[in-house]
Image (tube, helix red, strand yellow):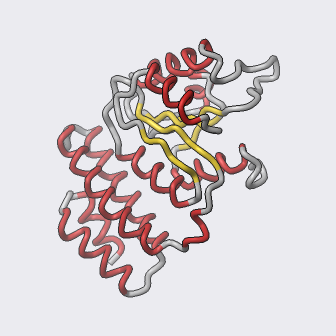
Amino acid sequence: MAQEFVNTLADLEEDQAIEMAEERLDAGEDPMAVLDDLKEGMGVVGDRYAADEYFIPDLMYAGEIIEQISGLLQEEMPEQEKEHIGTVVLGTVKDDIHDIGKDLVYFMFDLNGFDVIDLGVDVQPENFVDAVEDNDPEIIALSGFLTAAFDSMKETVETLEAEGLVEEFDEDGIRDGRKVMIGGGQITDDVRNYVRADGYETDAPAGVERAKSWIGQTPEA
């Protein structure tokens, strides 16, 4: 059923996808396995958008499907995994309205005990500043799907530095205190350097593990 579920998600068949997720969970399947297939299906959606087969309304619809299935999965996750361990301010940067990856990141961080402040999409640097001042997060997570988002990420980090909300890198390339993580399908280490982020991930579970290492929950990989 796993591949059929992936295909159903990729085809944006909302009712059937939700029904299949419910059936798998009712049968006692590991919610993390369903999550892996959810990520795979949404990866196909992203590929179809990049190939001009899907358009912005399709991405918005995909986000709605993610939200509903993520809710089902969260109900099945062990409660002890949700103990609060830190705060993350999350958002898709300005001039980018993609929320598929961001929503998966939200789900994984929330599941693993982080208090997530989701600012949505097309978020101006000043809105990140306000959210950081109001919530004092350990981590700021910037999402972007388009290559044009890289400049917005860089602007956001520079604005946060100018406001004294994140430290500038020292001569060894290390930033003390609050960390900045970036993510998206086209992110590389070169982009991380350009943006002046502390780290990047293209996979939500890996992003959680990096965040945990930053706040001392797990060893740095």
Taking the image as shown, residue 190 lies to the left or right of residue 77, namely: right
Give the farthest residue toward the right.
Answer: 172
Taking the image as shown, residue 200 lies to the left or right of residue 130, namely: right
Image coords of residue 133 (percent x, y) = 56, 27
Q: Residue at x 58, y 48 (%)?
A: 207
Taking the image as shown, residue 69 lies to the left or right of residue 203, namely: left
Which of the 4 image quadrants contains residue 171? top right
Image coords of residue 21 (percent x, y) = 32, 73
Which of the 4 image quadrants contains residue 139? top right
* Number of marks present in the image shown: 0
Give the farthest residue toward the front.
Answer: 134
Q: Looking at the image, is 28 positioned above or below residue 160?
A: below
Q: Quadrant of the N terminus?
A: bottom left
Q: Looking at the image, is 64 positioned above or below residue 60?
A: below
Query: Considering depth in this image, is 11 or 119 the residue closer to the camera?
Result: 119
Q: Residue at x 66, y 47 (%)?
A: 210
Q: Residue at x 25, y 44 (%)?
A: 59
Which of the 4 image quadrants contains residue 158? top right
Query: Considering depth in this image, is 149 or 82 the residue closer to the camera?
Result: 82
Give the farthest residue toward the top.
Answer: 162
Image coords of residue 55 (percent x, y) = 19, 39
Query: Considering depth in this image, is 164 or 144 the residue closer to the camera?
Result: 164
Q: Residue at x 53, y 53 (%)?
A: 109
Image coords of residue 113 (percent x, y) = 59, 57
